[in-house]
Amino acid sequence: MATKKNTPVDEKFVGQDFDLFDALTAMDKKDSEYYDRLTEEQQKKFVPYMMTHWMSAIKGSGDVQGYYLRSVDYHANKYLFNEYVQKHPKLQWLMLCAASPGIGKQFHAWIPHIKAGVSKLKDNAKPKDIKDYYKKVYPKLTAGDLTEIANAFCVQHKRKIYLAEKFPELKFDEVELLSELVTDNEIEEYEKELGN
């Protein structure tokens, strides 16, 4: 059995399910050909979004943790849901490999998500929940820093919910961008002009 690029499928993969931890190790090592060695069935089980979540959170020094988090966001996270990129899982694999600093295998930890209703801009973010979430992501931050981050998140989130409700035709990433461009004062002025 061979893949489209005539790269032979690694025999150790035949008859095996997709192994998340092998895949993470391959990404850590920047193994760009790993995806090609998977069987077609295993390739179908590759879930890029889930991989970004695992890839971005490692246990290690603060510098390496920070690098992984920022690099996964920069190289993969902000592009994965692009309508064209979604059609190319090999490209998504390469984006995740690009996020690795290439310093070898790391211990990747699962970090729970923010509640679905909050992340989909359906429910208001509660400072305590956001603080608890960021405490898991950044365990070394002080309580004061966590409070500040949670409060800033909630202020931005409130603005995003407002924009998503006012402009339901906008996609999620467009709401994100608009939220960065518009200030709370501009929203107040807009509401005054509407007579609200």
Image: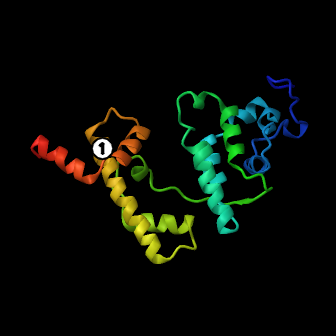
| Left/right of residue 73 with respect to residue 20 in the rendered view | left
- Residue type pointed to by label 1: Leu
Query: Residue beneath label 1, please?
Result: 163
The residue carrying pointer 1 sits among few (fewer than 14), some (14 to 19) or many (20 or more) residues within 10 Å by Cα, namely many
Whether residue 122 is situated above or below residue 64 in the rendered picture:
above
| Residue drawn at point x = 36 percent, y = 42 percent | 178
Relative to 169, residue 157 above or below: below
Q: Residue at x 67, y 40 (%)?
A: 95
Q: How is the image coloured?
A: rainbow
- Locate the N terminus and report the quarter of the image it occupies: top right
Q: How many marks?
A: 1
Q: Decide if residue 175 is on the left or right side of residue 134.
A: left
State whether residue 10 is above or below residue 116: above
Residue projecting furthest to the bottom: 143
Identified at 68% across, 44% down, the residue is 96
38 or 96: nearer the eye?
A: 96
Residue 127 horizontal/vertical position (percent): 38, 66
- Residue 169 horizontal side relative to residue 1, left or right: left
Q: Position of residue 51 (x, y in %)?
A: 65, 47
Of residues 47 and 27, the one nearer the viewer is 27
Could you tell me if residue 126 is visible in this image?
yes
Q: Position of residue 184 (x, y in %)?
A: 26, 53
To which quarter of the image does residue 10 belong? top right
Residue 135, image x, y percentages: 52, 69
Q: Is residue 129 visible?
A: no
